[in-house]
């Protein structure tokens, strides 16, 4: 069995306070990214569509880990309209094209975690993860030293993806 070992992800999960103990509602960072026009670079948004947007994951499993996020703050697929779901699938196709254009991975993990028990770090705002994969993409360094090797800053990655989306959309 192959394992995608990502110990650095625990820092992200630990950044959330226990929801039952937290009486103050935190602003959903996905909603913030959705409404903050002009802050795309800062908030890692790489593409906007009518009903959803595409952003980099701040705590990626691999370089180029994208998320497809509806503007609507809902926890489940059945809470989205057919039009919203269709656009998310179109955004997924676009994201895969962009990742292939930039880095030619050997494969992808694509998933939706519904509920905290299923691994959702943000269980109240559904989103699709798009994780590019390469043969041998988990190295020993992450296992022995709790360190992830990242070859490019998120800021640089955001710029590269934003440009790639522009080129891809102009050729459609």
Image (spheres, grey):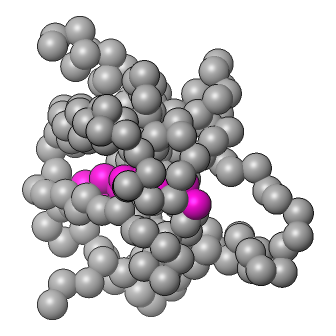
Quarter location, residue 102: top left
Taking the image as shown, residue 117 lies to the left or right of residue 68, namely right
Q: Residue at x 38, y 55 (%)?
A: 78
The C terminus sits in image quarter: top left
Quarter location, residue 137: bottom left
| Vertical side of 166 occupied by 90: above or below | below
Q: Position of residue 131 (x, y in %)?
A: 30, 57
Q: Is residue 112 visible?
A: yes
Q: Residue at x 63, y 21 (%)?
A: 37
Q: Is residue 99 visible?
A: no
Nearer to us in this view, 171 or 120: 120
Taking the image as shown, residue 77 lies to the left or right of residue 57, namely left
Taking the image as shown, residue 151 lies to the left or right of residue 107, namely right
Nearer to us in this view, 90 or 38: 90
Asked whether residue 128 is drawn in magenta, I would say yes
Q: Residue at x 19, y 57 (%)?
A: 108
Query: Which range is magenta?
Result: 124-132
| Vertical side of 36 occupied by 28: above or below | below
Quarter location, residue 50: top left
């Amino acid at each position: 069995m192959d394992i995608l070992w990502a110990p650095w992800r625990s820092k992200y999960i630990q950044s959330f306070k226990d929801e039952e103990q937290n009486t103050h509602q935190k602003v959903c960072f996905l909603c913030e990214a959705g409404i903050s026009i002009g802050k795309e670079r800062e908030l890692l948004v790489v593409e906007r569509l009518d009903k959803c947007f595409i952003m980099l994951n701040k705590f990626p499993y691999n370089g180029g880990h994208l998320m497809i996020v509806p503007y609507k703050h809902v926890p489940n697929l059945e809470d989205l309209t057919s039009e919203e779901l269709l656009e998310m699938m179109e955004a997924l196709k676009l994201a895969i094209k962009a990742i292939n254009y930039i880095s030619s991975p050997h494969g992808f993990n694509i998933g939706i975690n519904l509920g905290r028990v299923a691994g959702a770090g943000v269980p109240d705002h559904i989103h699709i993860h798009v994780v590019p994969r390469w043969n041998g993409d988990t190295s020993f360094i992450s296992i022995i030293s709790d360190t992830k090797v990242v070859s490019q800053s998120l800021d640089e990655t955001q710029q590269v993806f934003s440009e790639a989306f522009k080129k891809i959309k102009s050729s459609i």
